[in-house]
Image (tube, helix red, strand yellow):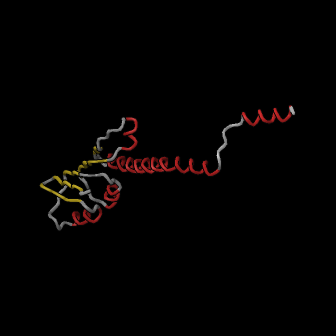
């Protein structure tokens, strides 16, 4: 009889048990927000690589303002505006700029565009769909309809 009492006390002190179904549901519910965070961080890493290239070309970058705390915002910020002097309009540069989905404006100075049929204008519009070019003298302004 004492053996059954000891066995009953041991059962009372066990940890709460979960079923396999409950464990799988918890893993699923935890994985969804973590996957979203991972996707945002990967996109931010790609944008940071593009920003490093732009700064290597002598350009400046401006970011969207965020209501998030600074320690979070620096990991999820998005590029809003780019300024590049003497923008050469190479295919490599256009491919990098295409990686910036939140880009609203690109400014360049020291670059001459002859008119709307200029070869560079066509290349820019083909590489960056949804952009509007405005040029005057030595300054080119590209705005995006996004």
- Image coordinates of residue 104 in percent, x first then y, are 25, 52
Work out whether residue 26 or residue 16 is closer to the camera in this orientation and state it. Answer: 16
Q: Is residue 67 above or below residue 95?
A: above
Q: Nearer the viewer, residue 127 or 27?
A: 27
Residue at the spot 23% in from the left edge and 57% down from the top edge? 145
Percent coordinates x, y for residue 34 in the rendering:
49, 47
Q: With 98 as the anchor, is 116 left or right in this view? A: left
- In the image, farthest residue toward the left: 137
In this view, 16 is above or below 130: above
Q: Residue at x 31, y 58 (%)?
A: 94
Q: Nearer the viewer, residue 1 or 77?
A: 1
Q: Position of residue 1 (x, y in %)?
A: 87, 33
**Location of residue 9 with respect to 105 vertically, above or below:** above
Q: Kindly indicate the quadrant of the structure image that contains residue 13.
A: top right
Is residue 72 found left or right of 61 in the rendered image?
A: right
Residue 19 image point, x, y percent: 65, 48
Front residue of 30 and 77: 30
Quarter-of-image position of residue 132: bottom left
Judge from the rendering whether residue 33 lies leftward or rightward of residue 116; answer left or right: right
Q: Quick check: 21 left or right of 103?
A: right
Q: Residue at horizontal 66%, vertical 39%? A: 16
Number of numbered discs on residues: 0
Q: Residue at x 29, y 46 (%)?
A: 58
């Amino acid at each position: 009889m004492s053996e059954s009492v000891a066995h009953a006390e041991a059962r009372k002190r066990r940890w709460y048990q979960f079923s396999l179904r409950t464990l799988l549901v918890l893993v699923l519910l935890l994985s969804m927000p973590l996957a979203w965070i991972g996707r945002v961080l990967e996109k931010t890493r790609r944008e940071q690589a593009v920003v490093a290239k732009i700064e290597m070309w002598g350009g400046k970058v401006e970011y969207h303002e965020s209501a998030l705390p600074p320690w979070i915002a620096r990991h999820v910020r998005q590029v809003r505006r780019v300024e590049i002097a003497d923008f050469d309009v190479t295919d490599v540069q256009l491919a990098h700029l295409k990686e910036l989905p939140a880009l609203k404006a690109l400014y360049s100075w020291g670059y001459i565009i002859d008119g709307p049929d200029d070869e560079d204008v066509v290349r820019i519009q083909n590489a960056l769909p949804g952009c509007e070019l405005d040029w005057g003298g030595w300054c080119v302004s590209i705005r995006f309809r996004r």
